[in-house]
Image (tube, coloured by chain):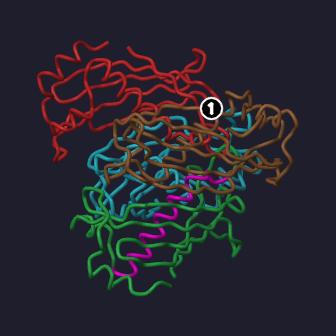
Chain colours: A green, B brown, C red, D cyan
């Protein structure tokens, strides 16, 4: 499991006074990227070799709103690993309170957006689900 | 059911060459707003009376990517109506092909972000699920 | 001169209750794209031939804020045409009141992001400054 | 002068393969907020007392594009202080190379979006221009 901290700025919020619901998906992207990087998987290098993780589906629950100035913790863990796909479970917390919980399936694709079995070195670096 | 058209611009896309996964949620917000407006429910007036629809959860499937310059159709229908919540089913299509399908639960809340039974006039305007 | 209309949604606004200052630049991109399209210049086709308009500088004045639910008019005109660059003058209005006025310089670049003289057919389609 | 670091993620980029021109304005907001915070000025507390810094104008030059995976330095300094306004000068750099340079005027406003002389404690905390 990995953990990332994000501070909420004006650009994250909407006129309801809280973080706009789509913007959590940006935090989640950042946190997954950092998680993979900690495992030695760099999206940029992977892309240069013609591979990409595309988001296949997102199931997201919004439990309580985050607000301007909040410092949020975004946790990431991998809950499932298959041949050509990964499942992440992520939470967004403020002072330990869970604001958002999410599961996301990523599919490994080539440059034609076709699913492919993940390369051996990626599989090795991923290791076991958390 | 209602239908809205969106053209894809640079700001919608990412360096993978396709629409960024979070940006569909903006299209979906717009389409729900127009759907409700066609039923006589104006979010702005509702907010001035102290009511708001907050997104409670989103289940979204990405089937195929949209690209720069595409014209997308976003369809919206209400699949469930409860005391204090609504469920939308929405699709994003390009020339009839379904790119994204989504169900979203909205909760009616007051200014303290507490769920409330929907006011009678809103319930009347909503009518039956599609 | 061309004119485009935009409705303001939640995703455009921030917790100050108004349109977030960076989001006007998205409206401006859309309006420039439509202006060029009306002159027969399609960004997508241009890109497929290896050409791109990159934003070189933006001078933007914010005179009054736009709010949720507003319908905005975005006007676009070309104020200058040079060998390898264009200058747009654009305004964002609400009921005729100018909220934002902007001038933007675009440079014509190749796929290596190097400035190039604009192709003859583009120059012809652009015609004279407004 | 203060300095902040930002990593570029997918959500920052567009299908041109570079950071979308409007997204730098988000980095700039973040960097100004951190600059002010280092001087003891917290936007959130200021807002609770009814004051706000609104962006009045932005002059931005794009010199070279930032790309996915880049780590950017955003520098901020105050170049001018008046009764009711501030001028920031900011740069976005990658390994010392200036990619973007910007000057931004912020006006101190009340909750009715009317310009006001800045409160004495804010003026004291700001001190002299850099």
Answer left or right for D123 relative to D7.
right
Where residue C103 sits: x, y (%)?
38, 27
| Region rendered in magenta | A18-40
Answer left or right for B112 relative to A59.
right
**Mark 1 sits on what residue?**
B34
Answer left or right for C105 relative to C23.
left
Where residue A90 sits: x, y (%)?
56, 71
Where residue D118 sits: x, y (%)?
68, 43
Q: Is residue C92 above or below residue D16?
A: above
Residue D67 in sight:
yes
Q: Residue at x 22, y 29 (%)?
A: C85
The image quadrant of residue B48 is top right
Q: Residue at x 56, y 59 (%)?
A: A24
Residue D78 in magenta stretch: no
Q: How many marks?
A: 1
Q: A64 or D92, which is in the foreground?
A: A64
């Amino acid at each position: 499991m990995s953990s990332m901290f994000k501070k909420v700025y004006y650009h994250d919020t909407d006129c309801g006074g809280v973080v706009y619901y789509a913007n959590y998906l940006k935090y989640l992207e950042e946190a997954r990227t950092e998680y993979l990087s900690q495992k030695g998987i760099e999206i940029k290098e992977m892309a240069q070799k013609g591979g990409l993780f595309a988001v296949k589906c997102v199931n997201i629950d919004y439990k309580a709103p985050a607000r301007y100035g909040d410092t949020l913790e975004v946790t990431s863990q991998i809950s499932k690993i298959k041949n050509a796909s990964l499942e992440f479970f992520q939470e967004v917390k403020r002072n330990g309170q869970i604001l958002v919980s999410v599961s996301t399936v990523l599919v490994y694709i080539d440059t034609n957006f076709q699913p492919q079995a993940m390369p051996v070195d990626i599989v090795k670096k991923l290791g076991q689900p958390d």
